[in-house]
Amino acid sequence: MCTCGRKPFHPERRAAWSEHFFAWAWSRATTPLEKSYGRIKDKLFADLSGEVVEIGPGAGINFRHFPAGVHVRGVEPNPFMHPYLKAAAEESGLTLSLDGGHAEEIHLPDASVDAVVSTLVLCSVYQPELALSEIHRVLKPGGKFYFIEHVAATPGSLMRRAQDFLAPAWRKIGDGCNPNRDTASLLRAAGFGAVSIEERHIKNPFIIVAPHILGTATK
Ligand SMILES: C[S@@+](CC[C@H](N)C(=O)[O-])C[C@H]1O[C@@H](n2cnc3c(N)ncnc32)[C@H](O)[C@@H]1O
């Protein structure tokens, strides 16, 4: 694995009680959210194959949308999510290996995986630029990063002002989630060969979690 002179990544661990609570709460919230995200995921993930890394897979809700035969490596730092992930993989008939690390430091060699998946995760990672450079590093040439993320609203809009104002409190209650992160710009600057981004308004119970972007970035 090439660390290429990079500073080591030392995440602050979230409090165990908060990780435990978030795993419990998220495992219950994800199934109802499928009404909004399910069909989009079926289409987006239809051509996944081979070795797939999913960063922040949470309770494993995406596994049901992955084609048969993929091997998933879940990079999930919250250990209380791991039992849900194992159960979801078994239910979907996927093979899973679990890594309790972070997207900012993926424990895999350069150019070793066919695809990386992220849904609603880049809002929460500590260092999104570093996470994206790790995603780019582990992908084989021609490999794709598939994403669905909620992002910052247009600068100056009422929604953006609400996101900026509420962000500190939202981070605390939302397990580190930043409602005002400009993930689309970060993706475009991450060194991928081709980036395809579609902006969508996806129905969501959390009003400041909008708009969304979805698409792929190819190495
Ligand atoms: C909102 S949940 C989304 C879970 C899942 N992707 C989904 O769509 O249901 C965010 C997930 O990202 C994980 N996460 C937070 N920081 C992370 C990091 N630095 N690297 C990898 N995963 C992270 C959290 O533990 C959590 O499981």
Image: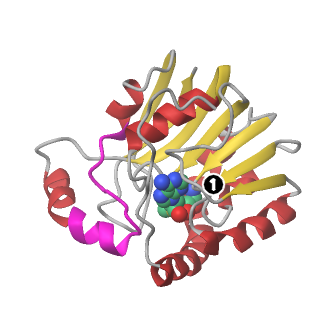
The residue wearing badge 1 is 38
Quadrant in the rendering for residue 44: top right
Find the residue positioned furthest to the front. 5
Task: Give the left or right position of residue 36, taking residue 181 as reference.
Answer: right
Q: Is residue 97 visible?
A: yes
Name the residue rendered at 36%, 67% in the picture.
206
Most foreground residue, 191 or 2 = 2
At 17% from the left edge and 60% from the top edge, which residue is drawn? 162
- Name the spot of residue 136 as percent of width and height, x first: 55, 28
User: Which part of the image, by quadrant, shows the N terminus?
Assistant: top right
Figure disc tally: 1
Residue 57, image x and y in percent? Answer: 62, 57
Amino acid found under the numbered disc labelled 1: Gly
Asked if residue 157 lies in the magenta stretch, the reply is no
Horizontally, residue 46 falls left or right of residue 208, namely: right
Q: Work out whether residue 155 or residue 36 is closer to the camera in this orientation and state it.
A: 155
Question: Is the distance from the Cβ of mark 1 to the nearest ligand 1 atom less than 8 Å?
Answer: no
Question: Element under label 1?
Answer: helix
Q: Is residue 35 visible?
A: no
Q: Around disc 1, counting alpha carbons within 10 Å, would you say few (fewer than 14), some (14 to 19), or many (20 or more)?
A: some
Q: Report if residue 179 lies within the magenta region.
A: yes
Compared across the picture, whether 205 is left or right of 143 comes to: left
Q: Which quadrant of the view contains residue 216? A: top right
Asked if residue 80 is positioned above or below residue 141 in the image, the reply reads below
- Magenta segment, which residues? 167-183
x and y percent of residue 147 in the render? 54, 40
The quadrant in which residue 85 appears is bottom right
Task: Tell me what residue is drawn at x 72 percent, y 32 percent.
Answer: 113
Colour scheme = secondary structure
The image shows residue 59 at horizontal and vertical percentages of 65, 67
The residue shown at (43%, 52%) is 125
Which quadrant is the C terminus positioned in? Answer: top right
